[in-house]
Structures are given as C-alpha cells and as structure tokens.
Amino acid sequence: MDVQTLTYLIVGLTFALYIGIAIWSKAGSTKEFYVAGGGVHPVMNGMATAADWMSAASFISLAGIVSFVGYDGSVYLMGWTGGYVLLALCMAPYLRKFGKFTVPDFIGDRYYSQAARTVAVVCAIFICFTYIAGQMRGVGVVFSRFLEVDVDTGVYIGMAVVFFYAVLGGMKGITYTQVAQYCVLIFAFMVPAIFISVMMTGHILPQVGFGSELVDAAGNPTGTYLLDKLDGLSTELGFAQYTEGSKSMIDVFAITAALMVGTAGLPHVIVRFFTVPKVKDARSSAGWALVFIAIMYTTIPALAAFSRVNMIETINGPDSQGVAYEAAPGWIKNWEKTGLIAWDDKNGDGKMYYAKGAENEMKIDRDIMVLATPEIANLPAWVIALVAAGGLAAALSTSAGLLLVISTSVSHDLMKKTLRPDITDKQELFYARLAAGVGIVIAGYFGIHPPGFVAAVVAFAFGLAASSLFPAIVMGIFSRSMNKEGAIAGMVTGITFTAGYIVYFKFINPAANVPDNWLFGISPEGIGMVGMIINFAVAIIISKMTSKVPDDVVAMVEGIRFPKGAGEAQDH
C-alpha cells in the first residue's frame, strides 16, 4: 500500500479507537466530567498526564527547534521536564489534599474571594487559548501533508474529532482516550528514531547513537562522530556550531525558569492530579508521568541531530554543491504541496542549496522536521503513516485537556460558583459542554491564523502561566499571611506585564524583537520569569498593606500543608 492509503488506515483506526473510548466512558455527572470520578489509577493517570502534556509542541515542533538551533533548543528540554519535578514535589499532593475540581476553585476558596476566582478563570482561559492555538496548528500541519488537504481543512477535521470526545466524555472520556493516545504517540516517535539510529550509528538506542560514531552503508565505523559531523556541516554552511549556543546566559536562564514554573502552573496539567483516589497517588502519578515523558524527551536530541544531517545531505548532496531540483528527493516535492517548504533558485543554476544568509535557496518550516524525518531517511511507508498518527495523537490529547479547563472554568467557576449558584448538576454539565463547543470554535480560528510556529506559541502560554497562576498557587499553599488583595493584585500585574511584553515584540513591533531592545536581555519566550517575580513582589507588598487573613483560612492552609487523607474532589 502507498503512504496515503496507509495513513488513512492507521489514522482512521486510531480515531475510531478514541471515539469508541469516548462513547464507552461517557460522563454522566459533573464529577465524572471534571475529575473522571476521582478514581483513576496512578499509572494510568501518569500515562494520561504525559499525553496531556506532550503536545504537538513536544511531538512535532520541539525536535524541529533543536534540529535548527542546536544547543539553544536545550532550554525547552530542561524547562519543560524540570517543571514536572517542581510540580510533583511542591504542588500536586497539596492541591490533591485540598480536593477541588479546578485551579480557580482552589484560588477562590483559598483567597476567600469571588473576585480572585474570576481573575483566575480569566488567566486560565487566556493561557489555554494561547496554548491550544499551537495544538490546532499542529493538527493542520499533519493533515495538510498526509491527507493532502490544506492546513485550514486539517484544522476543521481536528476540531470535529476533539469536539466529539471532549464534549461527550469530559475528563473521564479524555483520561482513557489520552492513555491510548500516549501509546500511539510514543510508539510513533520511537520507531523512526530507532530505525534511523541503527542506520546511521549501528545502535538500537537513539540516546546512545546520539553520542556515537557514524557508520557507512556496510555498517563499518567511519571515524566521525555524529555531533562532530553536525558541527562541521553547520559552520560550512554559515550557521553557528550545532553544539554551541548563541543565546545569552540570562536569556537561557529566564526561558528555562519560565518554562519550568509555567509547567507547574498550567491548569490543564494540575487538574490531572484531582483525578486520583488519594494524596499519595498524586505524587505517584507525577513520578510515572516523568518516566513516560523521559522516554520521548531523551530521544528528541538524537532524532533532531539525525534529521539535521539527513536533511542537509539530501538537499545539498554529499559534496555540498547542491542537488538538481529535477532530481530532488520525493519528500521535498511532497512537502512543497503544503507550502511548508519552498525553493527559490537565486543563482539560476537549477540546483537546490540550503545555507545561512544570502546563499540560502530553501525555506523550510521547522514544524515539519519530525513528520518529514521518515521520508527523508527513506523509511517504510507504514512508519511514515505511523508518525502522522502520532502527531495527531499528541495534538488532540493536549487540545482535549485544554478545552476541559476552559469548559470547567466557565461552567463550574463562573456559572456555578459566581453567576448562578442555584443551577442543577444537569444544567452545569450542559454549560460545561456548551463552553467546550465554543472553545473549540475559537481554538480553530487560532489554528488557522496562528501567531507563530507551534513551540513558540506554546512557550508563551507557559510564560503566562508562570506570571499569573503559579505564584498564587504557591503562596496559597505555603504562605498563611497571603490575603486576597495581594493574590489578585499579583495575578493581574504579572499576567498584564507578561502579555504586554509578548504582544509588543511579537505583534505590535516585531522589528524591535532583538536582544538590544529586550528588558535585561530577556526574550519574549523568557519574560514570564520576570512577570513571576513581579507577581510575587506585588502580592507580598499589597498583602502587608491590607487586612489579615481570616483565622479559618489560616487553619485551612495548615491543613493543606500537611497532606494527610484522601481529600476527595468536591464542588462545595
């Protein structure tokens, strides 16, 4: 069978599996819709959490960033994985002990304020829509290549699938669907990585192949290490050495920190720890999630390096003199149809040439690297189709988790807890599904009109989470003296500063987006760290200038900090 037929078959089977699980696990109550009934096994929850978190940015875009920028891409690997350690140690068990449905629920009750709850809802929705824009874009990229439709149509198809199982099943349906999606995406990511590692280095483990010598077609060592080869190719073509970074130390630190604390403040990740039966299960499921995430994240640098070498050599040829366009490999012609690769014959010699600066004739979208890697390496058609299914699983799993946060924030925190406290359980469930439907439409719009490539858009979401929700949650757990006035002022100031900085440099004046113009030399991707510091500072100052925290809230904080007992999720 050809690639397209296999893609339709494999993607169709995975979609049928997801929809079947959604029907089987349809939510019948708000508790099932919000926290899957609170009875998910820690290992299953860890797998679902990994799928929820390893989005299109991880599967599709992260290896592309590392492949194109080399060492500088390591900030994403360090920040995103480090954030899970922070979440597991400092937040997950305490939030599980508190036993609420959502992050705004925690903030509203901890800070004894409907205004605090509403601010948290606005922050959560803002973060989720920023994040989901990248996921919908990822869905469109996959469909545009493998189903031979344009990117916009691909987004519409993804919207329809997510709508079905997110709106029908809620957290219960999403959890078990994400377990299946993790299995699909990790298998789809590892198979081509193992294939290419064996072909290029003779090692079955990509993590070992990453630091090994390259081998020739007969499997004999060539005496050249993979990273040495990449450094040589990079400098020859005018790029910086692959193993050396160009970012300043302060920017690397800021981006890593923003991604780390942003991970610990993401509402769609935090809510996963409300779905397990006991407090100890929250910590356990965070540990399992780290294991499942590490499988992919330790493989990404290797796959990025393999892909970079193969891409350069197939475009420029083994002698680095360029390849005639008529003789271009099939993967280039296939991806040209999507508009994500383009060739401009600047010197009129009829040959393609990839380099830095004026000599470059190739426009290559970073988001295609993982999806194109099996074709570049001439792997079997079924591997190419499998990667397409994995990319869709990654994008759809995270989209569903984000949509659930949006729907619960609207139905539970705005409607039930603020605007209409007298609504029934059935009415609340209706509002949750309605909000998810509206959320999908808005997310689709951002997928069709994305504000950047997938991983960059997602990085902004982490910065917004770092500067708004993370400080409020941490101070809510560990500070008895933090009051509602301080928390509200901190959240508003932090997210306003961070969003304003990002919008200015990315949309209002992108020409000014250079290190000389950045505050303290920190890029928009890392400014969330500064926003977080501002949030903490404003919150502490305002709390000292205003009223004391009520005694019953102080007692509640003491109870959270010593997490004993199940703390079953409840809505009152």
Image (cartoon, rainbow, N blue to C red):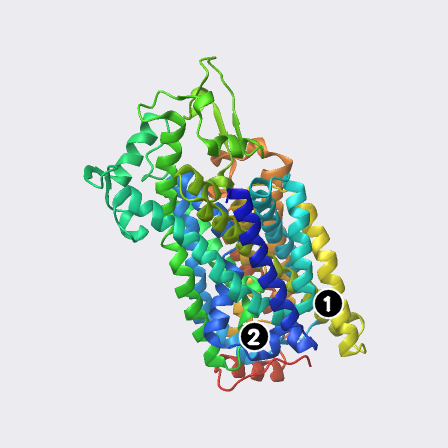
Residue drawn at x 56%, y 75% is 275
Pointers 2 and 1 in contact (C-beta within 8 Å): no
Q: Is residue 392 left or right of residue 415?
A: left
Dot 2: within a 10 Å radius of its alpha carbon, few (fewer than 14), some, or many (20 or more) residues?
many
- Mark 1 or mark 2, which is nearer the start of the sequence? 2
Q: Quadrant of residue 280?
A: bottom left
Dot 1: within a 10 Å radius of its alpha carbon, few (fewer than 14), some, or many (20 or more) residues?
many
Quadrant holding the C terminus = bottom right
Q: Which of the numbered marks, if any, corresponds to residue 432?
A: 1
Say which amino acid is labelled 1: Ala
- Does dot 2 land on a helix, a strand or a loop? helix
Say which amino acid is labelled 2: Phe
Residue 50 in the image: state x and y as whole percent.
Answer: 48, 63
- Does dot 1 land on a helix, a strand or a loop? helix
Q: Residue furthest front?
A: 1
On screen, residue 538 above or below 242:
below
Query: Disc 2 and disc 1: Cα gap in Å?
Result: 18 Å
Residue 91 in the image: state x and y as whole percent.
Answer: 49, 71
On screen, residue 382 above or below 86:
above
Residue drawn at x 49%, y 46% is 61
